[in-house]
Amino acid sequence: YRTGKTKCFYLAVVFGMLSFYSYSPAQMVVAVTAILLLLSDWKIHKQNWKIVLLGVGLGLILAIPYFRFLILHPGENKRHLEIVNSYWIQAVPFIEKLKIYFSTYIELLDPRYWFIPNTVDLERHVMREYGHLIRWSLPIFLLGLGITVKRIKDGNYRLLLIALLAAPSGAALATAGITRTLFMVIPAALITALGFEQVFLWIERLKVPRSLIAGITFLGLGFANFFILNDALTNGPTWYSNYSLNGQQYGAKQIFTEIHSMLEEDPNQSIYFS
């Protein structure tokens, strides 16, 4: 759409709505992304205002199931906020809620949350001594982020920043948690790739063949993947010993197997499991 293929706008609307329906925090992420894209590409939208209006109409049609859901289940969104224990439904002044929202939002943008092991997330959502993103790539990510900010006048780079800024917007409605903000992985990967590209350009100036750089990078990343996989499969079961609801939730197979054996021995006994 931005490069002149204006009818692609309709396809973007379709994929945007599919994302909207995919996961509850995605509703906020898609809304924030749409608003930021509207501001970012305002001149292009003005030139193609008829297509934009038709796209908005298409979006409203695709939103009919959501509106129908709100009519048939008017309290369901509030119930969901209750389930995740969101501060938005608590007896807290509105200004205080905004403060909590933006402090959580900033926390989820903080590179330390992503690249350094944290105690914020549930144990079953983290790998011990690992960050959510691989730690040694942080300098490369920061380099890519610097390049992105430097080239912000280019709409392609603005798009990366928009994706980055929108990613935590849905998760911040509740407490910080990796499962609610996995959207961040996409812009983080792309921005890190920009950083790698710049490093490769610097290395090429030393007359190092591009094929050699690509081969070493492929082998390095491939080895890292298999190393992490092996570590998770071999050591993961003993990383944590908390098997409660907020822990690993491990042992269902063993417990239910034992219950089955007990019932075979005495079918008349009552077994309560919590």
Image: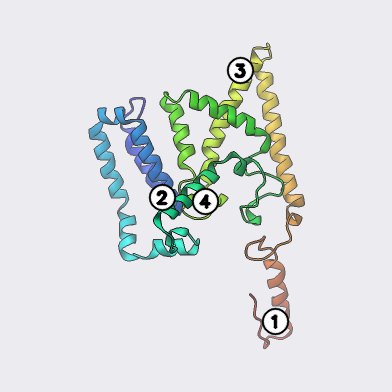
Question: Quick one: which residue is furthest to the left in this view?
Answer: 50
In space, the residues marked 3 and 1 are separated at their CA atoms by 68 Å
Tell me how many marks there are: 4
- Residue name at image x 60 percent, y 42 percent: 114
Secondary element type, mark 1: helix
Answer with left or right where residue 230 lies relative to residue 104: right
Residue 50 position in % (x across, y down): 22, 34
Question: Label 4 belongs to which residue?
Answer: 180
Q: Which label was assigned to residue 27?
A: 2
In space, the residues marked 4 and 2 are separated at their CA atoms by 11 Å
Looking at the rendering, which quadrant does residue 115 occupy?
top right
Question: Label 1 belongs to which residue?
Answer: 263
Secondary element type, mark 3: helix
- Residue name at image x 36 percent, y 28 percent: 2
In space, the residues marked 3 and 2 are separated at their CA atoms by 39 Å
Neighbour tally class for label 2: few under 14, some 14-19, many 20 plus, Cα within 10 Å? some
Residue 58 position in % (x across, y down): 28, 44
Secondary element type, mark 4: helix
> Going from the N terminus, do you reach mark 3 or mark 2 first?
2
Amino acid carrying label 2: it is Gln
Amino acid carrying label 4: it is Arg
Quadrant housing the N terminus:
top left
Q: Which label was assigned to residue 201?
A: 3
Check whether the beta carbons of the residues at disc 3 and disc 1 lie within 8 A of each other. no
> Going from the N terminus, do you reach mark 4 or mark 2 first?
2
